Amino acid sequence: MRQIVLDTETTGLEAGQGHRIIEIGCVELVNRRLTGRSFHKYLNPERAIDEGAAEVHGMRLEDLADKPRFIDVAPELIEFVKGAELIIHNAPFDLAFLDAELARIPGEPRRMRELCLVLDTLELARRMHPGQRNSLDALCKRYAVDNSSRELHGALLDAKILSDVYLSMTGGQATLTLDSSGAGPGGAAGSARLGTRPVALKVIRASAEELAAHERTLDGIDKSSGGPAVWRRAKV
């Protein structure tokens, strides 16, 4: 099973108002294990970045002036995610921006759900933890996932953090993080992880002699307490 954990950063909150993607970060899982493959691009949005958005991710338009446009990286992105299951926290937000960017490309319009299955970890968390806070930071605290390097939002860093959260939410995977440093437009971030393998536990059953001794012990408890032992009541 191939899954892609994806996150984006944008110029603002509403794709319908013409806001654009400025960063895409993806990490690959195969059979619930990080493969080390990733897709990460900073993008020139060709428009201003809202001040509120800049405070979240720390990027300004001048930081992105020499970066490619979405149309320039779209073929590589599509090739990376096609046929996989996308894992996204608050998927409607990211999908709206991705679909809007794809719609700007000349030719037949595409939508991400036509290329991939989608799993929304925010919706999953709301079903698992109703009435609780289910932001990525809240889930990191709940599942003891280290997000200490997340001073500002970043698409690749958040995708890596979300991969740990998703694995913990859906069964867990022991990890050994060697490098969890964040990255800005001029850097990169990476981590190495070791997974655990299922261990078959040996079942040792009581012998006939041990069972007989157990029954004699229960007889003694019955006699001293004036009634059947708790163990015998539980078996009824």
Image (cartoon, rainbow, N blue to C red):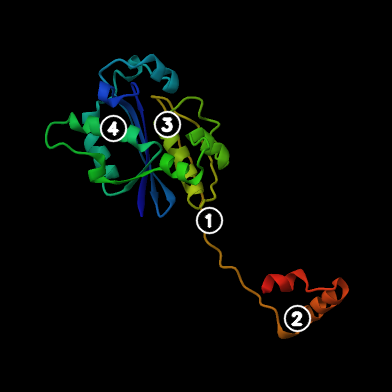
Residue 126 placement (x, y as % from top left):
46, 41
The correct choice, above or below, for 39 with respect to 55 in the image is below
Residue 41 placement (x, y as % from top left):
33, 31
Mark 2 and mark 1 residues within 8 Å of each other at the beta carbon:
no
CA gap, disc 3 and disc 1: 27 Å
Task: Name the mark on residue 210.
Answer: 2
Q: Amino acid at mark 3?
A: Ala
Task: Name the mark on residue 96.
Answer: 4
Disc 3 target residue: 188
Which residue is pictured at 49% across the width and 37% down the height? 134
Which residue is pictured at 80% across the width and 76% down the height? 218
Work out whether mark 4 precedes mark 2 in sequence or the reverse, and give the earlier one: 4
Please rate how many residues cluster around mark 3, counting C-alpha atoms within 10 Å: few if below 14, some from 14 to 19, many from 20: few
Q: Residue placed farthest to the left in the image?
A: 107
Nearer to us in this view, 80 or 135: 135
Q: Amino acid at mark 2?
A: Glu
Instruction: Point out the frontmost of discs 1 and 4.
Output: 4
Instruction: Point out the frontmost of discs 3 and 1.
Output: 1
The correct choice, above or below, for 129 with respect to 45 in the image is below
Identify the element where label 4 is drawn: helix
